[in-house]
Image (tube, helix red, strand yellow):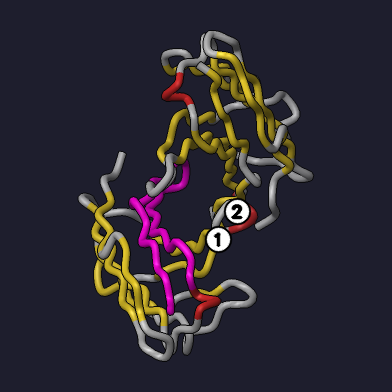
Amino acid sequence: GQQLNQSPQSMFIQEGEDVSMNCTSSSIFNTWLWYKQDPGEGPVLLIALYKAGELTSNGRLTAQFGITRKDSFLNISASIPSDVGIYFCAGFERSNDYKLSFGAGTTVTVRA
Amino acid sequence: SAVISQKPSRDICQRGTSLTIQCQVDSQVTMMFWYRQQPGQSLTLIATANQGSEATYESGFVIDKFPISRPNLTFSTLTVSNMSPEDSSIYLCSASGNTEAFFGQGTRLTVV
């Protein structure tokens, strides 16, 4: 599958700040997924989005499925030290046998 | 959701040897995949593990190097054959339906 365009590549943030990252694709996706990966672990699913325009929250995390179905963003509010990690967006394309396409990841480092 | 157990979690292997990684899912799933993740990089799909038949490999990956088995809906193995230092990476098992995908904790392989 294609690689999604994820930005920013990395960010240093102050504890308590809000964080935003986004992904875009050149083709339409049926589902957008956001994962967090801690060192030495596999990616853990944070939020799944299934419909264009859908806005979904999971605690301090909020993600939206873009209206065009070619983009998504993830917001983290009031960041804390345990938010450190790598965040990946991923998407399912029906035309690609439901194989996941991934973004390159956003590395988040929180300054205490 | 699906819980995926992957083992070993890490190994250090001699070049020229082979390592088999096991992946067990706690429920029957439609699809299982194997990924490779180089340090600091995103996930790259190696192959789709098909139940009872040969795996479907992505471009750049071949069966002789990465033989895969999937004897039933909940279990799969990936073998990294005739290893070289370039095979040092994290290998991840994934299970999915058509709307969500879950990952094992990964196998960190170092070839010396």
Residue A3: x and y in percent read: 69, 51
Question: Around disc 2, counting alpha carbons within 10 Å, would you say few (fewer than 14), some (14 to 19), or many (20 or more)?
Answer: few
| Labelled disc at residue B38 | 1
Looking at the rendered structure, the secondary structure element under dot 1 is: loop
User: Disc 1 sits on a residue from what chain?
Assistant: B
Tell me what residue is drawn at x 43 percent, y 36 percent. A45
Residue type highlighted by circle 1: Gln
* Residue B39 pos. (x, y %): 55, 57
Residue B101 is a magenta residue:
yes
Decide which of B79, B97 is in the foreground and name it: B79
Asked whether residue B84 is in view, the answer is yes
Q: Which residue position is annotated with label 2?
A: B41
Circle 2 marks a residue in which chain?
B
- Give the label on residue A22, or none: none
Q: Amino acid at mark 2?
A: Gln
Above-or-below relation of A72 to B107: above
Is label 1 on the same chain as label 2? yes
Magenta residues: mostly which secondary structure? strand
The image shows residue A89 at horizontal and vertical percentages of 59, 38
Q: Which residues are magenta?
A: B88-112
Q: Nearer the viewer, residue A94 or A101?
A: A101
Q: Residue at x 68, y 29 (%)?
A: A22
- Specify the quadrant of the image occupied by residue B43: bottom right
Question: Helix or strand or loop: what does disc 2 sit on?
Answer: loop
Residue A77: where, in percent of width, then height? 54, 11
Q: State the residue at coordinates (33%, 77%).
A: B69
Asked if residue B90 is among those painted magenta in the image, a careful observer would answer yes
Total marks shown come to 2
**1 and 2 marks in contact (CB < 8 Å):** yes
Task: Work out which quarter of the rendered image holds the N terminus of chain A and state it.
Answer: bottom right
Distance between mark 1 and mark 2 Cα atoms: 5 Å
Instruction: Give the side of residue B25 with respect to residue A105, left or right.
Output: left
